[in-house]
Image (cartoon, grey):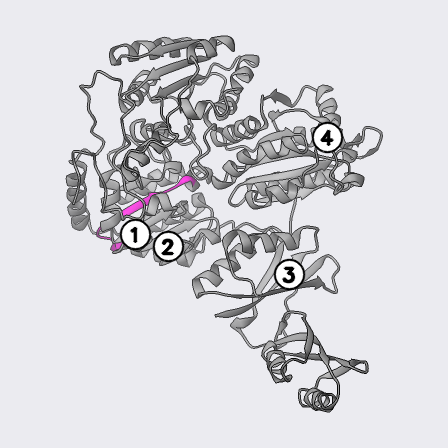
Amino acid sequence: MRHILSVLLENEAGALSRVAGLFSARGYNIESLTVAPTDDPSLSRMTLVTTGSEDIVEQIKKQLNKLIDTVKLLDLSEGPHIEREMMMIKVRAVGEDREELKRLADIFRANIIDVTDTSYVVELTGASKKLDAFIKAVPEGLIVEVVRSGPTGIARGEKGLTL
Amino acid sequence: MELTGAEIVVQALIDEGVEYVFGYPGGAVLHIYDALFKQDRVKHILVRHEQGATHAADGYARATGKCGVCLVTSGPGATNAVTGIATAYMDSIPVVILTGQVPTPVIGSDAFQEVDTVGITRPCVKHNFLVKEVNNLAEIIKKAFYIATSGRPGPVVVDIPKDVTDPNRRIPYHYPREIRMRSYNPVQKGHLGQIKKAVDAILEAKRPVIYTGGGVILGEGSETLRELVKLTGFPITSTLMGLGAYPMTDAQFLGMLGMHGTYEANMAMHETDTLIAIGARFDDRVTGKIEHFCPHAKIIHVDVDPSSISKNVRVDIPIVGPVASVLQDMVRLLREQGREADRAALADWWTQIEQWRGMKCLAYDRTSDKIKPQYAVETLYKVTGGELYLTSDVGQHQMFAAQFYPFDKPRRWINSGGLGTMGFGLPAAMGVQLAFPDAAVACISGEASILMCIQEMATCKQYELPIKVVLLNNGYMGMVRQWQEFFYESRYSHSYVDALPDFVKLAESFGHVGMRVERPGDLEGAMREAFGMKDRFVFLDVIVDPTENVYPMIAAGKGHHEMHLSPERELA
């Protein structure tokens, strides 16, 4: 099953490589990983998407918790949560395709953030599945480039993942 | 007090109560060596190879329970130390390794003797640090000792660039007495509710087995373990790493379990209905094929490291906590219960176990005119009266020692169990002998293993360490040869050592005493003579039967109930 893990890490040099190294050393799957500092500059927040049996995911969480740099860990998939990913997609936009792509962007509530005579850059935010759906919906052969941030997430409700 | 970075390193070691630093100098640590030269509180032991430094610090830690310390230079100094660091990591041994690094301005420029030590050691340390600022040095060293020795212990590397130890820069020195880390809080106590559940399971057990590992020794749980075993009357077995936590000469001890464990221990594991695992990690050499592991058992697992629990084998009653405190709670709750386990069932269980024991799975040919390695270990036990610190290398001799030298005290059997590092024994013995100068310390080894750190004989001479090397010399890498005999139709591919040195002369050339024994009748006398030389390092080259194999054996991929007892005695 797919799990989204949120990890508060000490904002130390090498913390990211400890996490990445753990996954490669123990052969765990890693679908995506994003990391950035938080409002507290001494802490980074990492969102990590992984898949595996319940036993494996349990072990992944224990191993992540065991890292000395890990301050807190939350498995977002265990409760109600919001997941968002951002994508920028460059498409070839000439002739009839220009209108078609514009309509498609509107349907997905995406923004066109760069325009040339022959191309658009479309920005879209949402759950990863929505981004997948947009990519599928773009007529064949028009995609020039796709860049995705990888999912981030936050638990619903008033409780926060803080110290 | 204003100190330079180099002086801070030394002063921090003094404040930490460090007795010995095992090390080898080089460019990046010269400032630290200069600071060491100017004091006499911390004693430096000059090894002959950095691997020896890490093993010696490791051996010191295993024997004393204190943190071992080593100091090596950057680049090759650090890479040579990696095998020893990984050895300590696999067996959860507290060691702090100080490595020199090139100056911070040139880090990343492929400078002379530069390697990414933090990167190379990351997968085999509990944690590591790169000190970028001298102002952080004292606190980082404190953290290193705290992390290495608390929770599940392990090695911690502190990588110190040369400019951080600059002799021309002094800063105020303050060594923290205590340290708190928001990201690291090892469990201090087991969950009482879980312990109660375990006690209930213990009281309901009909065919219980207590299975203990190195965690009992590391967690200082031996005494309480003895109480628990006596209180319950349960049979107990141990992993290679846990030997000595419970007296091996006691009738309730079934011997070691696992690949070369006893028949009675492994059969008890297979038939048990309640397995009480304490400070053991269900290693593959212990479990055999996981699908066949303890098929009938409810499993209780006590471990200080949550990630050990349900890693290889799913357990029913996990208890995360320090072994000693959990065992104390367990014993207390059992006493308060005032109930006893099912005595009748337990008596039947012991009858069954005695039947298995009656197979005498460790029997060997005592009429041979060659020295059998088993006989050599038995003689070692006889001569030393069990009062020995015995370090070991890796291979057949290690298994024979584990089977035939019954340790009655913890921290007496010192070997590389997890990583299985050949070359460990001799330098580890140096650490032990320095910790206990008056104790009898021996290293059991093979002619292949000993050559991997043979250079440390010079260290032994320099510090006059009266270690006894008991070499079971069979001319082969015995364990490799055994597997080739069993599983590769006796094609002994590169497992025969063709050009061995004359070990007697070799020992003599290092300034030691060398002796060779070739006949069983001469062995005991030779050993008595060797151990009689209380102030000399003696290298005893014992020529043993080259064809002997370690039995019993569970082949890889088999279960506990599928043991081979000997070539003559195959079990169905």
Task: From the viewer's perspective, tell me whether residue B159 is left or right of residue B168.
Answer: left
Asked if marks 1 and 3 fall on the same chain, the answer is no
Q: Which residue is mark 1?
A: B293
- What's the amino acid at mark 4? Ala
The residue nearer to you, when weighing A72 against A113, is A113
- What's the amino acid at mark 1? Phe
- Chain where mark 4 sits: B
The answer to the question of whether label 2 and label 4 lie on touching residues, with beta carbons closer than 8 A, is no
The quadrant the N terminus of chain B occupies is top right
- What's the amino acid at mark 2? Val
Mark 4 against mark 3, which lies toward the viewer? 4
Badge 2 density bin: few <14, some 14–19, many ≥20, Cα 10 Å: some
The answer to the question of whether label 2 and label 1 lie on touching residues, with beta carbons closer than 8 A, is yes
- Chain where mark 1 sits: B
Q: Which residue is mark 3?
A: A8
Q: Which residue is mark 2?
A: B313
Residue B64 percent location from the top left of the image: 50, 29
The residue nearer to you, when weighing B511 against B240, is B511
Q: What whole-number distance in Å separates the C-alpha atoms at marks 4 and 1?
A: 50 Å
Q: What element does badge 3 sit on?
A: strand
